[in-house]
Amino acid sequence: MTALSALRRWLRRDEGNVTMDFVICLPVILMILLASFEAGLATIRKVWLERALDLTVRELRVGALGSNPGHDLVRERLCSQIFVMPDCLTDLRLEMNVIDRTTWAGLDPAPTCVDRTTEIQPYLDFVQGGSNELVAVRACAVFNPTFPTTPLGLQLRLDASGGYQLAAMTVFVNEPR
């Protein structure tokens, strides 16, 4: 009888109740915290990519980058203005095309990003256009998720290298010459 009463006393104890709540709630709170961090970092990267593209295109419009800058020069200038992209020169791709104002054709709907699984990247059009032409510039960057196992990290559409893509686009009209 004493073993049975000792078992009943042990089952009625309530000293570990707070521990159970902590063990149940901690993973949920941590997932929310990590997903919020991932979303915030992705937003910061997107904003800096948009800002750097706008500043670079402003320099391109006024001729501060020369009369006919190439892809590499524009990409280097853009990368010098992005502070939250560690491998900017290797993970950033630029497209620049003239848009036909009658058909509004120029860029593909989906951005062409860097394929980090191959060494050689396909050539993209980089045409600055002539006087009074409408030009679209699009930048696409690939980032690795910081926490790929969080709910947000699991929802991101990843490429073959395990990175997610952020794209920014701007349009301008070349000044008359």
Image: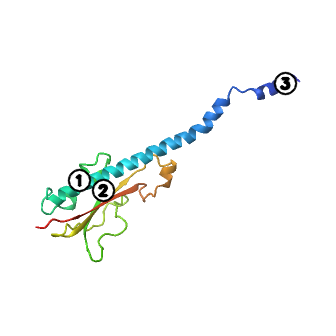
Quadrant in which residue 67 is drawn: bottom left
Mark 2 = which residue? 92
Disc 1/disc 2 C-alpha distance (Å): 16 Å
Element assignment for label 1: helix
From the viewer's side, name the closer residue of 120 and 27: 27
Q: Position of residue 143 (x, y in %)?
A: 38, 52
Element assignment for label 2: strand
Element assignment for label 3: helix
The residue shown at (50%, 47%) is 150
Name which residue type carries label 1: Leu
The residue shown at (46%, 44%) is 36
Q: Earlier in the sequence, mark 1 or mark 3?
A: 3
Q: Residues within 10 Å of mark 2 (few under 14, many from 20)?
A: many
Image quarter in which the C terminus is found = bottom left
Mark 1 = which residue? 55
Q: Residues within 10 Å of mark 1 (few under 14, many from 20)?
A: some
Q: Residues within 10 Å of mark 3 (few under 14, many from 20)?
A: few
Disc 3/disc 2 C-alpha distance (Å): 71 Å
Name which residue type carries label 2: Leu
Question: Is any part of residue 165 visible from this angle?
Answer: yes
Residue 101 vs 2, above or below: the answer is below
Quadrant in which residue 4 is drawn: top right
Image quarter in which the N terminus is found = top right
User: Residue 5 got which mark?
Assistant: 3
Question: Is any part of residue 146 visible from this angle?
Answer: no
